[in-house]
């Protein structure tokens, strides 16, 4: 197995372990927190017990006003019990919601870190192209298993770069513009060729793929960073 594949597999395995440990830690912390919150809430029947005690210890309270007061106290105890029950339900729902959010955030964070590492590894090692087929008739370039529809101008730019790669040459922006336009290199500007390269990269779509495929070597020019043996023009 290639070193890049091994390193990516190890990165994915370590990321999976980190996600599992993180999820377990989040669930454990929130479970302990929820248990403490629920256990520290007063007993829902505490108020009713106090009202009942007043009834038992004060059997001499037989006046109409006194009985009415005791009834109000009993109703207040029932309301208090209902409020505490609703608090417990709200706390439980909020804990589930917080757990889901934290788990999702952890998973996305680990996925982002893993993806960044993988992209960095790919960028360092370059893109592996097993076949590059340029079909002028279809105005399509086939890169491995991916097909990209290009404009005529983009096809011309890619064809020039492919021919230069077959000849082990590197072209500047001015040279690319001269070959395509048929003008003298002295009459062409570097920016014109750079614009053609930019449009080609935009046509290829995937920024990582296009920038790794069409390399810009400082002060030297542009080149297709692939083995010339995989290039086929039809």
Image (cartoon, rainbow, N blue to C red):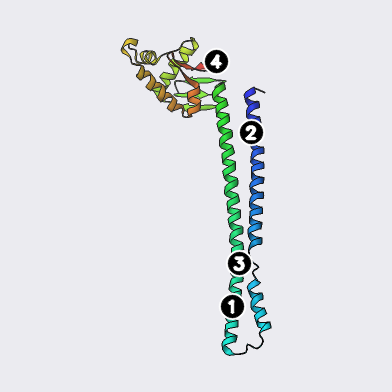
* Residue depicted at 38% across the width and 18% down the height: 193
Q: Residues within 10 Å of mark 3 (few under 14, many from 20)?
A: some
Q: From this viewpoint, is residue 127 visible?
A: no
Residue 32 is left or right of residue 169, and the answer is right
Report how far apart the C-alphas of labels 3 and 4 lie in the structure: 72 Å
Q: Which mark is residue 227?
A: 4
Residue 153 is left or right of residue 131, and the answer is left
Where is residue 231 drawn, in percent x and y? 52, 16
Report how far apart the C-alphas of labels 3 and 2 lie in the structure: 46 Å
Residue 8 is left or right of residue 193, and the answer is right
Report how far apart the C-alphas of labels 1 and 3 lie in the structure: 14 Å
Between disc 1 and disc 4, whose residue precedes? Answer: 1
Task: Using the image as rendered, state which of residue 84 and residue 17 is in the foreground.
Answer: 84
Q: Quadrant of residue 62?
A: bottom right
Residue bearing the label numbered 1 = 75
Q: Quadrant of the N terminus?
A: top right
SS at badge 3: helix
Nearer the observer: mark 3 or 2; the answer is: 3
Between disc 3 and disc 2, whose residue precedes? Answer: 2
Between disc 1 and disc 3, whose residue precedes? Answer: 1
Residue bearing the label numbered 3 = 84
Task: Using the image as rendered, state which of residue 86 and residue 166 is in the foreground.
Answer: 86
* Residue depicted at 67% across the width and 79% down the height: 53
SS at badge 2: helix
Where is residue 126 drawn, in percent x and y? 55, 21
Q: Would you say the residues marked 1 and 2 are in contact, meaning their CB atoms lie under 8 Å apart?
A: no
């Amino acid at each position: 197995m290639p070193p890049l594949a091994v390193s990516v597999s190890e990165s994915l395995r370590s990321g999976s372990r980190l996600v599992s440990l993180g999820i377990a830690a989040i669930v454990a912390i929130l479970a302990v927190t929820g248990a403490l919150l629920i256990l520290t809430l007063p007993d829902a029947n505490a108020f009713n017990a106090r009202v009942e005690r007043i009834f038992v210890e004060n059997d001499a309270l037989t006046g109409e006003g006194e009985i009415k007061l005791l009834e109000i106290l009993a109703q207040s105890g029932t309301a208090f019990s209902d409020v505490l029950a609703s608090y417990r339900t709200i706390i439980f729902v909020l804990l589930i919601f917080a757990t889901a959010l934290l788990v999702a955030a952890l998973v996305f964070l680990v996925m982002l870190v893993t993806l960044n590492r993988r992209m960095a590894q790919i960028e360092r090692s370059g893109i592996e192209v097993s076949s590059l087929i340029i079909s002028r008739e279809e105005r399509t370039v086939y890169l491995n298993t991916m097909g990209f529809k290009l404009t005529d101008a983009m096809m011309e730019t890619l064809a020039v770069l492919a021919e230069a790669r077959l000849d082990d040459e590197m072209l500047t922006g001015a040279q690319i513009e001269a070959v395509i336009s048929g003008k003298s290199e002295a009459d062409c500007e570097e920016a014109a060729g750079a614009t053609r390269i930019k449009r080609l990269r935009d046509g290829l779509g995937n920024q990582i793929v296009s920038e790794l495929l069409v390399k810009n070597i400082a002060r030297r020019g542009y080149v297709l960073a692939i083995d010339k043996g995989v290039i086929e023009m039809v």
